[in-house]
Image (tube, rainbow, N blue to C red):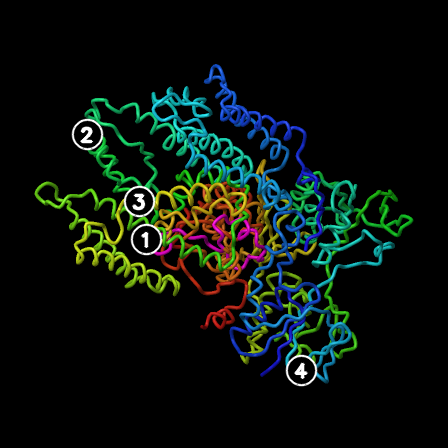
Amino acid sequence: MSTYDRSMALTGQPPKSLNRNQKMATLLGMFGLAIMLLAVFNVSFPQKGLWLSISLAAIFTGTLWFSWEAYSEKLPGIKNDGVWFKSISSKGFWGWIAGISLTGFYIILYFYPEYLGLVQGGDNKGVIALFDPLSKALSGNAASQWFVYGTLYTVAILAFGIKFMWKYRHNRYERIRTMSVMFFQTAFAFIIPELMARLNGDKILNGGSLPYYDLKNVWPLNYYNFEGYRIKAFLSSGDIGFALLIFGILSIFVITPILTYKYGKRWYCSWVCGCGGLAETAGDSFRQLSDKSLKAWKIERWVVHSVVVFVTLMTTAVIYSYLGTDTSKYWLTKSTFLIGIATLLTLVFAWVMLFKRAQLQKDAQYGAIGYFVIIMALIGMHFFSGDGNVFLFKSETLRKSYSFLIGSIFSGVIGTGFYPIFGNRVWCRFGCPMAAILGFQQRLFSRFRITTNGGQCISCGNCSTYCEMGIDVRAYAQKGENIVRSSCVGCGICSAVCPRGVLKLENGPLQGRIDSNQVLLGNDVDLMTLVNQK
Amino acid sequence: MENIVIIGNGIAGVTAARHIRKLSNKRIIIISGETDHFFSRTALMYVYMGHMKFDHIKPYEDWFWEKNRIELMRGYVTEVITDKKQLVVDGSRSVHYDKLIIATGSKSNKFGWPGQDLHGVQGLYSKQDLDLLETNAPNKDSCKRAVIVGGGLIGIELAEMLRSRDIPVTFLVRESSFWNGVLPKGESQMINEHILEHHIDLRLATNLKEIVADEHGKVKSVIIAETGEELPCDMVGLTAGVTPNIDFLKGSGIELGRGVKVNRFLETNVNDVYAIGDCAEQHEAIGNRRPIEAVWYTGRMMGETVAQTICGNKIEYKPGHWFNSAKFLDIEYQTYGWVFSERNKKNHEEHFHWRHAEDKVCITVAFDKDSRKFLGINTFGIRMRHEIFDRWLTEERNVDHVMEHLIDANFDPEFYRNYESEIVNKFNADHGKSITPKKKSFARIFG
């Protein structure tokens, strides 16, 4: 319908065009990437440490320079001019190129790390060898493909985080939130685990070795946290190992519910989480690409909750497989564990159905009942069949397929590789079981809501367009309803882009939090009573 | 089954249709010549600026209409034959109605300037205007300078739009300061400064004399009345307000003034014909309001009201406390209750004004000099809670109460710097008071 300039030129008129300095900044960043690309093709750099530093510095400075040129001359305020004209941010030519390249990178990373130069039991080659000096400086070990990925991931969050803070320099919520994700990525995801690796074999761990543990990475996002080899490693690492294991369990059952009750799931999803961190920084240019249709919301609910069921079954099966049967050796046996899981799920299910049923959509109710019946049937079948397998499947089969389908394909290849096509939160929205569980709490048991400011909404659509989770924020705002959605990660951008000051994220009282009445102020009180008669 | 026909698919007409559907099973037909589907008029600017695509400014997905059995018809109503209860669409098709709602909105004012109909001269109101702007000012090479005539809300929006494509803009404002017929001088002055910050060539107290054509009948320049200066330009935006879009009703027997004359039930002089939104004109103004209110929110309220009446709950249009909002480039503006400009202020209305030393943030509070009753507030760069001010206005609080509890009304995002104590300090100093601001209380806010 629109008639704007459709010339094929890659740089056009403002606000699409790049200035000369931005072109040079792009060149600088590309130079940094080129060093890595050459390394991939086994160009052997002398002084790897130096060339790695040059490469990372070029990428980092290039990004910062580019953003400085984009925002420094402009007054503080919303910077969305031309978002839908630029091919990179509107699923145009460069958007597809970026999407395909990222997807390709993830496929190689997950499935063919040898092309990056990974050598099992020998000296690394290629780009992984380029990262050896940094890895040795941190953990004392040679780099792996995961170390390369972790470093680039951190660089991306830091560089694009600074870009994001410039872009939203008028908005203190955004600045503080971004500092938080930058901190948690650098310290918790990147540096601390590497330093923890230095303790391995030390006497404070009783000579044991801790598994690689990003402390903020909670089950079920960290779906492998309770696998046999990790439990052994925790338990063999003295008091510290044991404390970490307890921390992992408390994170799920105590820490996250309390924080989510107080602040909504944003405390995790847009303040702490690494996946969220990348989405909010490097992925910010793609947030408008999320699908806002009702259909997408329906698909989202079924897919993400199926992943929760999948990860629950898989984890139960895996833990079950390594537990013993003899109560005299260890109190937690196969049967007590299964009974415990069944009891816990029943309690949660009963609580929701008794007290919170009214707050769920019809299909959510059916879904909850359906899933509950499936899990209980599987547990029951297991007890009565006396099969050696867990439920109907081998635990190892479940674990492998989860790790392949969800851990690699969904969270990596689709989740991040498709940023420029489906938006930056595809994984968080459709795939992340952690987000689903926190969202469930947020919807039913939290103080968090996005308050709508009376009748001030003009239905412009900025909030919905820039919602990375694909929530049709406007649908609520224009009716004067508060927004209480399980998928909301509390990034605060809807509130930022609103031209009329209609939306505010806040942690208020539970009373009146979800009010489906139309409370459009400014109109006659008697009329509103009539409007709200159902 | 009754046939409800609504002319116009803007916020007023669509709100009426939605509420009639909620309340009844009547057949509903919306006729629009402008677009197939309802869109947010106030958001057209964001399409030109590339913040959104046209699809994004449609508040409902396209399946919504069929699902709710609201029939959409594309075409311009050219004639209304009230004695036969018939409409003529595009001069040929005829449509029968049992009840008719006129919600045709506005059109841009043109005050008879020489050259006002040249190519390259346009207003900014409709989707067609937006498409025209893409032709008249696609980029800074085709449009080397644009001149905007008329310093109101649409004028400043158009300036912001053109600046997003780096097009040089000259902004002719008749008043001595931007929008000072509505805004008190401190606020108007701050917006003047902000306009200049955005590199817009703001010419205050400047009138258009004529628009000059080149040999192809396209705009070449404008001539300024005061100085006779000739400004070369490729596009002229006429944004000196809007006027009801009711020409097609002439001779229909429906009483017209500047708009369609309606009573408090939004009924016209003809049975079963109603008018709502921008195009409706009250016989007598309601309170401090104008007889014609071309505002998004009032269109919505009238739509809700007329739906009740049509579905058998005859009720008056009774707007509550006045509120409005806008955004001037980067500065958000909200208003609750009445704050008049110096030009329109009555004697008993006193103002308290506070402006931040560096940032573009200010507020003006109006109150009654004698009774100290709180009358209204304008805020720039601070968001305020509608519900709280609505309550204070209903409870007829005095200005001291408002100052003491101002933090309750703050609606800025979390972690934003609060200015309330600074504001109250200035208020205390100006008025010899010693009010201590209260701490924010959720119990009071949501109580």
Tell me if residue A180 can be seen.
no
Q: Identify the image quadrant of the C terminus of chain A.
A: bottom left
Circle 2 residue:
A238
Residue depth check, mark 2 versus mark 4: number of the one nearer the observer:
2
Quadrant (top left/top right/bottom left/bottom right) for the N terminus of chain A: bottom right
Magenta residues span A442-471
- Left or right: where does residue A381 sit relative to residue A258? left
Q: How far apart are marks 3 and 2 (CA)?
A: 28 Å
Q: Residue A309 carries which label?
A: 1
Which mark is in front, 1 or 3?
3
In the image, taking residue A483 as reference, residue A351 lies left or right, namely left
Disc 4 residue type (three-letter): Asn
Q: What number is the disc on residue B271? A: 4
Label 1: how many Cα within 10 Å (few below 14, some 14–19, many 20+): some
Select label 1 or label 4 by which is in front. 1
Residue A423 lies, in percent from the top left, at 51, 46
Q: Give the prevailing secondary structure in the magenta stretch.
A: loop
Classify mark 3: helix, strand or loop: helix
Within-10-Å neighbours for mark 3: few <14, some 14–19, many 20+: many
The earlier-in-sequence mark between 1 and 3 is 1
Q: Is residue A455 magenta?
A: yes
> Which mark is first along the chain, 2 or 3?
2
Decide which of A456, B47 is in the foreground and name it.
B47
Which residue is the site of mark 3? Answer: A399
- For the view shown, which residue lies furthest in the right direction? B215
User: Where does the image place residue A205, in percent across and percent down from the top left?
Assistant: 21, 26
Give yes or no for contact between labels 3 and 2 (Cβ–Cβ under 8 Å).
no
Mark 1, secondary structure of its residue: helix
Is residue A498 or residue B325 the one in the foreground? A498
